[in-house]
Image: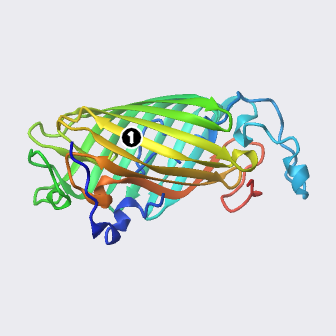
Amino acid sequence: MRSCRCGPRFARRAGSVGAALCLAVCGQPTASAAEPDPASATNTKLPTHSVLPSGGASDARSWRKGRPENGYFSVGEPRWFISTKSDIGGLYLKPYFSFGYGLPHWIWTGIDVNSITMLEFTQVYFGIRGSTPVFDLAMGVRDTYSFWKTYLEPRASYVQEDLRGTTPNTRYWAWEGEAVGAIPLPHSAILLDYIAVVTLDVPRDKYLYEESYRAIVAKPFFQAMRVAAVARLMREDALKIGVLTELLTATGRGEAVFRMGPAASIQLTDHLELLGVLSLCVVSPDHLGLALGAYGVSGLRYRWATGESAPKFPWQGRLIP
């Protein structure tokens, strides 16, 4: 198998990866199914019934005394809710909303609606989801429109320039199912992610650059598998840092795509998280460079839900670390 070559064009095309830095474990930001959520998945215990202290306490020790062991969103009464965990990052915007029943951002089931817009493409996803701190299932459909890439004539290998053609830009629908699991360990966790994708309307005689998975596929069905080893550090395990590996198989191209790289997130407040991942191409049949072959994201994530005990705007809340 051939290894990827990453060219100098990345410096000129940094916007195409959303100014990726180095855990959402979600790679290139996409509208997607059950996105792995290290803020909850790497906790090691089931929710307790502690209550949050009054938001009026001025002393930091008073604020932290009696804090929920598994985080702000792990406590409360199961209920019907609307929630968000929307991202804003380097040249991309990802609004993400859910409607369901349970404890939002912790244990719940319901409907996900999210989208992503960036310099290369726009995408919308709608699906159903069941989520717990250690297991997550989702399935749904997404609509993707590329701003400049076209369907590809079949060939053994491609370079970055091959993706821009004279035919109309690609727009395609895809069905996606995802299962995410976490193996809790002392001060760490192993995250496992399996994704099955079926493109629904790609011409049979064409290949497709799949925006969500940063690879060229020849068949409607393909699958992605990710494994991340995550360490939990700092106060309340606010800092999570690890290594993500990713394998894209059954693409019909004869060779798999393998990527790996660093991933990290830091919980700034109960509602605001800073996250980033950069998964670099190690093996691929193509030579797409960093701009199109890597898989990365960096940005801020804001969580909120109806019925929570102490809602805050993104710029509000006490720092956790």
- Which percent across, then down, holds residue 159? 17, 57
Q: Identify the image's colour scheme: rainbow, by chain, secondary structure or one colour.
A: rainbow
Quadrant containing the N terminus is top left
Q: Residues within 10 Å of mark 1 (few under 14, many from 20)?
A: many
Q: Which residue sits at x=44%, y=60%?
A: 20
- Which percent across, then down, holds residue 73? 70, 39
Residue 178 vs residue 191, the one in the foreground? 191
Residue 252 vs residue 262, the one in the foreground? 262
Would you say 315 lies left or right of 59 here? Answer: left
Q: Secondary structure at mark 1?
A: strand
- Which percent across, then down, holds residue 129? 50, 30
**Visible in this render: residue 192?**
yes
Specify the farthest residue to the bottom. Answer: 12
Q: Which residue sits at x=21%, y=33%?
A: 220
Task: Say what amino acid the circle numbered 1 marks.
Answer: Glu
Q: Which residue sits at x=8%, y=39%?
A: 205
* Residue behind mark 1: 246
Quadrant containing the C terminus is bottom right
Q: Which residue sits at x=48%, y=32%?
A: 192
- Figure quadrant of residue 47: top right
**Visible in this render: residue 133?**
no
| Residue 45 vertical placement versus 4 (above, below) | above
Would you say 10 lies left or right of 19 here? Answer: left
Total number of numbered labels?
1
| Residue 199 vertical placement versus 275 (above, below) | above
- Which percent across, then down, holds residue 314? 66, 58
Would you say 286 lies left or right of 44 here? Answer: left
